[in-house]
Image: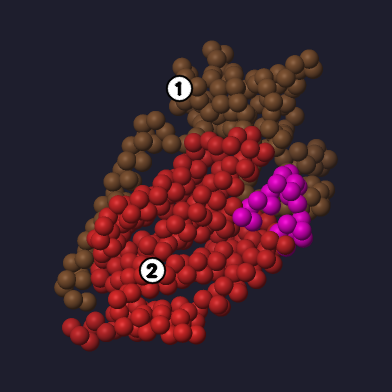
Chain colours: A brown, B red
Amino acid sequence: MTPKRKNRLMLVLFVIFGGVTAVGLGLYALDKGVGISIFYSPQQIAAGEAPTDKRIRAGGMVQKGSVKRDQSSLKVEFVLTDYKQNLNVIYEGILPDLFREGQGIVAQGQLDSEGVFRAVEVLAKHDEKYMPPEVAEALEKAGVDASGEQLESNANYQLEVSQ
Amino acid sequence: MNMLKKQLMPKWFYQMASPKWCYKITGQLLPIFGCAALGLLLLGTVWALLFAPPDYQQGNSFRIIYIHVPSAILAQSIYITMALAGAVGIIWKMKIADMVAYACAPIGASMAFVALITGAIWGKPTWGSWWVWDARLTSMLILLFLYFGVMALYAAMGKPSKAARATAILSLVGLVNIPIIKYSVEWWNTLHQPATFTLTEKPAMPVEMWLPLLVMLIGFYCFFATSMMLRLRTEILSREKRTAWVKELVTKSSVR
């Protein structure tokens, strides 16, 4: 490589690393300041990391068996969990098609004084696992989820049986 | 010094620097990639839409991944190609590299656009929202704007050599966005799910679902190669129009 080309290579590397450093530090500051993550987990909310005076998003799994629908209105209550902490959510409105127990969701709303999350919008968060309906059925019968882990409900059931 | 220079890059790299040689070789490669793209995209589309099984939760709406995922991967690959070609153009002062970078920009922009649009169409029924400002979606939008910026900057500069240098620096700075897009779903909480398709891990879906996706992905790459070479060849002819070989080529083909 001629010295001239070497100089230009250095310029290119300098531009790339300069850009990476600047953007990296900027993103780090932004994440520490306002937060880049779109939602807080129930654990973060329980630890007081989420602001209570403004609208936030909370994300987690809808706990199995926790969904209570009001018969006369669109009001729905459920428990949002990350399997470490739980958060009670109240929402009034239309839920997305993929909303179901055991599925991930992201709710937008505000914490009230009793620590209940008053949601104004509920979005379904689906995972990267796809499978045909027959496979899902077979897996459910076998009592395992898509990654081959024991399902919670079946695990409990088996525990009771063995006792 | 001369010895070292010769060994640094393979022979084809220096041959590529000749517009005439490049025009000839792309002319030979073009039909191969063109046929491959057409065949693979047709096969992949039919397979994905008619024969791949529906998803147990999303039903048939999940089939949009067969467009969404390849176009999103391509948008990023094309950006890397464009930035690397720009770097080669700066370091080796290679005209062909400048032209490759120039040819890449609109193709990459349209891929990013397709990925964003299909994502929005998919997002409405599955998430319940067309758009959320999460890290993955926002960084992908920034990628589209980077493409627009590169194209606008190129159009604004008069001299091609000057324009190539300026756009190369812009695209190299923007290169930082690529790892941000890739790891956004891991670094932060996002509504967007983690990667469906990676080279290193077993895909989180059965073979009959990911095989058509792989076919579509390779088809998209062949399509990119075809359209890029087409644009590149036009660019070579228009920039080299004063040279003897182009004049000879044009007069020969007009006689026929």
Identify residue for label 1: A51
Please give the label number shown on residue B235.
Answer: 2
Residue B175 point in image, percent of width and height: 36, 55
Q: Residues within 10 Å of mark 1 (few under 14, many from 20)?
A: few
- Which amino acid type is shown beneath numbered disc 2? Glu
Quadrant of image for the C terminus of chain A: top right
Query: Is any atom of residue A104 visible in this view?
Result: no
Magenta extent: B47-67
Nearer to the camera, A65 or B102:
B102
B101 horizontally vs A105: left or right? left
B212, above or below B127, in the image: below
Q: Nearer the viewer, residue B220 or B199?
A: B220
Task: Give the main secondary structure of the magenta stretch.
Answer: helix
Q: Is residue B231 above or below residue B170?
A: below
Label 1 is found on which chain of the structure?
A
| Label ID, residue A81 | none
Magenta highlight on residue B37: no
